């Protein structure tokens, strides 16, 4: 029997060479937007897109001076709109099956959240910027450069993505025109830019701009996590992955079957060439009433693990901006060779390491019980309540970590009616089921008619123009 010899350099590391174009995760698929050339997924798609944008905003790492500029130009906003359109296709097409759910009306609550966030978030974003300043916003984002923190790339990315999707939704419905609400749209994009730039620390706004890496950990944490991992036997690997999968499932249920309860960081390339991934799952979120089922669980559990790149013949690894690990080949679970488990009891408490044995004995059964409790609650909850609760998970949950860390969450609840739906957005609820609007019309228009749904701002638009008449 021949024995497999370890390669001197894992193949996936070639993806980080400056001239490498990556591999296609969706071979043959291309995204079309306006006058841009057809765009494939991955590293090559990012390169072609950025090379064809009008400004240099996304063609280089940004500096603090860029972030401190008070607003974008119309051309810069159009470059952002174009990149968002491709980025959403690039990421969400790989996860198309997650767009619908047998548990909750996912596409309906997403559309309602887009509608509400577009009108409501700018007020909070402008107020937070006035209070903290741009430097304070970037510092706020930097405070999340540790595991098990909801101030992360996923939540920051969502603030930009949902703003764009809310704009697209109202354009699709014919409620708004592309040149309306420009001051609010500009302010929201600047707030998102400051958060992502402060968090990432590499000058970029999307992981795809930096070959699908998000390594936003302080050096001390990176070294600490590397040193914490222990070799896994076949038996302990099954225990490790079983506990991790259980926490992942609970995190999805607690966040109404969406990805806001879990995010990955990486890849951190180890000395032996293997990638280390840091996966955080949020197993309790006290902002949601149904989190009572998880009241005896920690706020978050983090799983750090090393993947044997040679064992799985790893060709490419993408840590996409929504904090999801994608690999080719797809299955990396059997190639996990080391791991460690960490716990954060409350959102503002210290992260601490616990042994795999203790974690399994203490949490595996309670995590399962909590998952069952949330599942039963969902099956007993009326559809309208599920749609509204899901919309709040998006609209409140995405901006909540930043408000909470800044000490402003209670203020926005009491003075700004954070947990309310704008009257204009509330009317959208009744459109969600008509002619399969949320399930078919919206996703079809977003990805097949992107130049109209993600419509650019016209060349003669005035950036001071909001919407001054509903006629």
Image: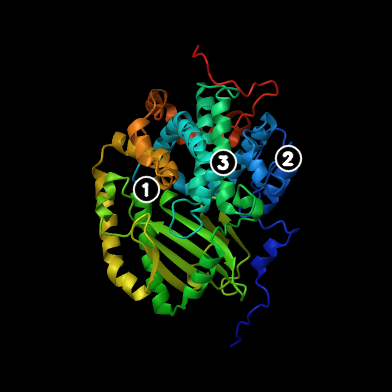
Whether 210 is drawn above or below 312: the answer is above
Mark 2 or 1, nearer chain start: 2
Examine the image and state in which quarter residue 233 appears: bottom left
Whether 41 is drawn above or below 128: the answer is below
Mark 2 or 3, nearer chain start: 2
Q: Position of residue 51 (x, y in %)?
A: 75, 44
User: Disc 2 vs disc 3: which is toward the camera?
Assistant: 3
Using a 10 Å C-alpha cutoff, classify the residue at mark 3 as few (fewer than 14 neighbours), some (14 to 19) or many (20 or more): many
Q: Position of residue 330 (x, y in %)?
A: 54, 62
Q: Nearer the viewer, residue 361 or 349?
A: 349
Residue 11 visible:
yes
Using a 10 Å C-alpha cutoff, classify the residue at mark 1 as few (fewer than 14 neighbours), some (14 to 19) or many (20 or more): many
For the residues marked 2 and 1, what is the alpha-carbon distance in whole angstroms?
A: 38 Å
Q: Nearer the viewer, residue 433 or 207?
A: 207
**Extreme residue in the top direction:** 471
Examine the image and state in which quarter residue 9 appears: bottom right
> Tag on residue 255?
1
Mark 3 or 1, nearer chain start: 3
User: For the residue labelled by badge 1, is the local secondary structure a helix, a strand or a loop?
Assistant: loop
Q: Position of residue 19 (x, y in %)?
A: 76, 58
Residue 387 visible:
no
For the residues marked 3 and 1, what is the alpha-carbon distance in whole angstroms?
A: 30 Å
Q: Residue at coordinates 42% horizontally, 74% vertically from top-left?
A: 237
Using a 10 Å C-alpha cutoff, classify the residue at mark 2 as few (fewer than 14 neighbours), some (14 to 19) or many (20 or more): some
The residue wearing badge 2 is 37
Quadrant showing the N terminus: bottom right
The residue wearing badge 3 is 134
């Amino acid at each position: 029997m021949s024995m497999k010899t370890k390669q001197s350099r894992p193949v996936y590391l070639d993806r980080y060479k400056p001239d490498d174009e990556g591999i296609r995760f969706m071979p043959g698929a291309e995204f079309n937007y306006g006058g841009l050339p057809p765009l494939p997924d991955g590293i090559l798609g990012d390169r072609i897109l950025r090379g064809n944008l009008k400004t240099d905003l996304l063609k280089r790492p940004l500096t603090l001076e860029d972030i401190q500029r008070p607003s974008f130009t119309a051309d810069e906003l159009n470059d952002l709109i174009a990149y968002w359109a491709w980025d959403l296709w690039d990421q969400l097409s790989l996860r198309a099956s997650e767009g619908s759910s047998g548990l909750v009306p996912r596409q309906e609550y997403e559309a309602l959240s887009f509608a509400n966030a577009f009108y409501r978030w700018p007020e909070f974003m402008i107020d937070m910027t006035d209070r903290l300043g741009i430097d304070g916003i970037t510092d706020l984002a930097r405070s999340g450069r540790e595991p098990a923190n909801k101030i992360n790339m996923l939540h920051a990315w969502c603030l930009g993505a949902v703003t764009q999707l809310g704009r697209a939704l109202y354009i699709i419905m014919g409620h708004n025109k592309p040149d309306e609400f420009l001051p609010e749209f500009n302010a929201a994009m600047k707030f998102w830019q400051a958060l992502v730039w402060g968090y990432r620390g590499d000058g970029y706004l999307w992981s795809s701009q930096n070959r699908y890496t998000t390594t936003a950990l302080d050096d001390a944490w990176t070294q600490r996590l590397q040193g914490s991992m222990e070799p896994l036997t076949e038996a302990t690997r099954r225990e490790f992955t079983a506990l991790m999968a259980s926490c992942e499932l609970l995190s999805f249920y607690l966040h109404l079957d969406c990805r806001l309860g879990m995010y990955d960081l990486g890849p951190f390339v180890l000395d032996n060439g293997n990638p280390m991934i840091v996966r955080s799952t949020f197993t309790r979120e006290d902002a949601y009433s149904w989190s009572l089922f998880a009241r005896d669980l920690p706020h978050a559990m983090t799983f750090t693990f090393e993947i044997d790149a040679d064992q799985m013949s790893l060709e490419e690894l993408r840590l996409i901006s929504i904090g999801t690990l994608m690999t080719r080949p797809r299955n990396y679970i059997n190639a996990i060779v080391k791991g460690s488990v960490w716990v954060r009891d409350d959102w503002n408490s210290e992260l601490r390491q616990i042994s795999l044995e203790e974690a399994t004995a203490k949490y595996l059964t309670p995590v399962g019980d909590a998952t069952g409790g949330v599942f039963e609650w969902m099956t007993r909850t009326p559809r309208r309540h599920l749609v509204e609760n899901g919309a709040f998970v998006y609209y409140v949950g995405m901006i909540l970590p930043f408000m909470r860390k800044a000490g402003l969450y209670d203020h926005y609840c009491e003075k700004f009616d954070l947990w309310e739906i704008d009257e204009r957005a509330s009317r959208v609820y009744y459109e969600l089921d008509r002619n399969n609007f949320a399930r078919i019309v919206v996703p079809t228009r977003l990805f097949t008619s992107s130049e109209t749904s993600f419509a650019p701002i016209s060349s003669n638009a005035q950036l001071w123009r909001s919407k001054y008449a509903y006629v």
